[in-house]
Amino acid sequence: MRTMRRLSSEKAEIIAPRLLLTECANALLTGVKRGKWTGAAADLAYGFLVKLPFRLADDAHYLDRAWELSRRYDNHPIYDMVYVAVAEGAGTTLITADANLRSRLTHLAWINGPDA
């Protein structure tokens, strides 16, 4: 949330693959199933999710590059590499909390963790 607030205050354009919405929505449903939060809390969070100020990129446009990256980096999950391919294609920084992905791609200076 700190990262989103900072980017918003900087009036930064935030680009993400459409996949982000699907993954986040699925995480909300999984949290309800596992009893981590209520259905009402998930509904509220989903309402915020779909209103986030992202410019959504068409995943299909980046799929070939994501495939190449996945194959290059020991068949790392392609859905993670879609985020990398979108950021690379946009010539922007990728901000991810996925420490495993960041450690795999440490040589790419444009991949960072969220604000602490």
Image: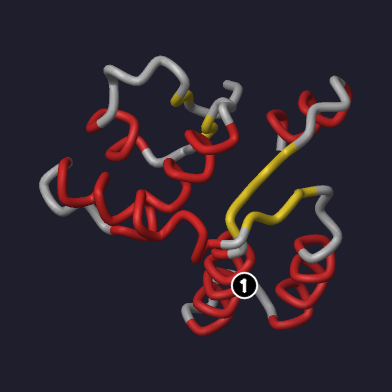
- The residue lying at 63 percent from left, 71 percent from top is 37
Kindly identify the residue that appears in the image at 58 percent across and 56 percent down: 17
Q: Quarter of the image for the N terminus: give it.
A: top right
Who's the residue at 52% across and 32% down the image? 94
- Residue 18 figure quarter: bottom right
- Percent x, y of residue 15: 68, 43
| Image position of 112 with respect to 29: above or below | above
Q: Residues within 10 Å of mark 1 (few under 14, many from 20)?
A: some
- Is residue 15 found left or right of 73 in the rendered image? right
Q: Position of residue 25 (x, y in %)?
A: 62, 72
Residue 100's quadrant in the figure? top left
Q: Residue at x 50, y 77 (%)?
A: 30
Q: How many marks?
A: 1
Q: Quadrant of the C terminus?
A: top right
Q: Describe residue 21's horizontal placement relative to residue 33 as left or right.
A: right
What color scheme is it? secondary structure
Q: Residue furthest left?
A: 74
Looking at the picture, tell me which residue is in the foreground, 63 or 55: 63
Residue that carries the numbered disc 1 in the rendered image: 25
Local SS, label 1: helix
Question: Residue 43 in the image: x percent, y percent?
Answer: 78, 77
Q: Amino acid at mark 1?
A: Ala
Residue 112 as seen in the image, left or right of residue 77: right
Q: Position of residue 87 (x, y in %)?
A: 53, 37
Task: Using the image as rendered, state which of residue 28 and residue 25 is in the foreground.
Answer: 25
